[in-house]
Image: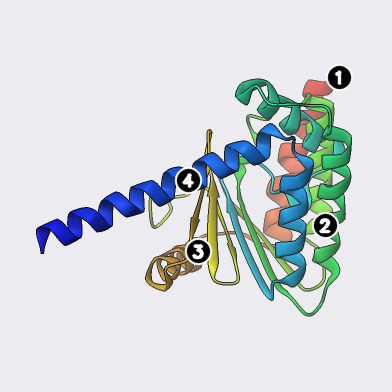
Amino acid sequence: MPDVEAERLRQDLRTLRLKQLAWRRQLRAGHRDRQRQDLVDEQTASTIRIVDLMAVPGVLQTPDYARAIFVSQAALLEIPAGDIDEAIAVRMQRQHVLYDSSKTIEILIAEAALMHPVCTPAQMAAQVDRLVSATSLTGVRVGLLPAYRPVPHLLPHGFWIVDDVVSAEKVTGEDRETDPEQVAVYERLTDSLWSVAVTGDDARGVLLAVGRRWAELAR
């Protein structure tokens, strides 16, 4: 039995490495194709739940904010940056999903994600203004995890739950989880985080304060 378990673990490790290699190969070809894959996944999904700790999720990004992230990632990973304009166009196209009333969409962002951007203060002020507008989207639940508020569980990374698949992008790769028991853990974690989140006017109040700070820094 131990030999069987050891072989299973070795196979899991091989599978993980293959997934990481595939992700890197895809990025080496540029950002556009990766965005197109997300576009298809989101268009065909019925439920999208997003928790982000260090960045505004792609479906709510402004073009300038998205460009700053793509450029920064390309520089760090030493991958081509020639298709960034096309990648941004696809990322903006992905945002159409927010107006699809047939889907259930929840977006939860930590206030910390608005504090250390890779874009300029003026661009960040515009990005926060976009988030303020997003809190009024019909059929989309947008919430914030305020700074200094205790959370029920430690959060090592952000993640997306698209139907029954969890994806978590890390510095040099992306993990995708399809095991129902593991996906259920992420679902419970998301539910618990929403229990301490702010929405509506409370979320707008936090965002407006953050936006004013970035506007001051942009002067």
| Residue 190, disc | 3
Q: Disc 4 or 2, which lies upstream in sequence?
A: 4
Quarter holding the N terminus is bottom left
Circle 3 Cα neighbour tier, 10 Å, few/some/many (<14 / 14–19 / ≥20): many
- Residue ranking furthest to the bottom: 102
| Residue 219, disc | 1
* x then y, percent, for residue 215: 82, 29
Tell me whether the residue at label 4 lies in contact with that at label 2, contact meaning CB atoms closer than 8 angstroms: no
Q: Is residue 194 left or right of residue 94?
A: left
- Which residue corresponds to mark 4? 18
Q: CA distance from mark 1 to mark 3?
A: 37 Å
Quarter holding the C terminus is top right
Q: Secondary structure at mark 4?
A: helix
Q: Is residue 46 left or right of residue 98?
A: left
Q: Secondary structure at mark 1?
A: loop
* x then y, percent, for residue 198: 61, 59
Q: Nearer the viewer, mark 3 or mark 4?
A: 4
Amino acid beneath label 3: Thr
Q: Residue at x 83, y 33 (%)?
A: 84
Q: Secondary structure at mark 3?
A: helix
Q: Disc 4 or 1, which lies upstream in sequence?
A: 4
* x then y, percent, for residue 15: 42, 51
Q: CA distance from mark 3 to mark 4?
A: 28 Å
Q: CA distance from mark 4 to mark 1?
A: 47 Å
Residue situated in front as seen by the camera: 193 or 91: 91
| Residue 95, disc | 2
Amino acid beneath label 1: Arg
| Residue 206, disc | none
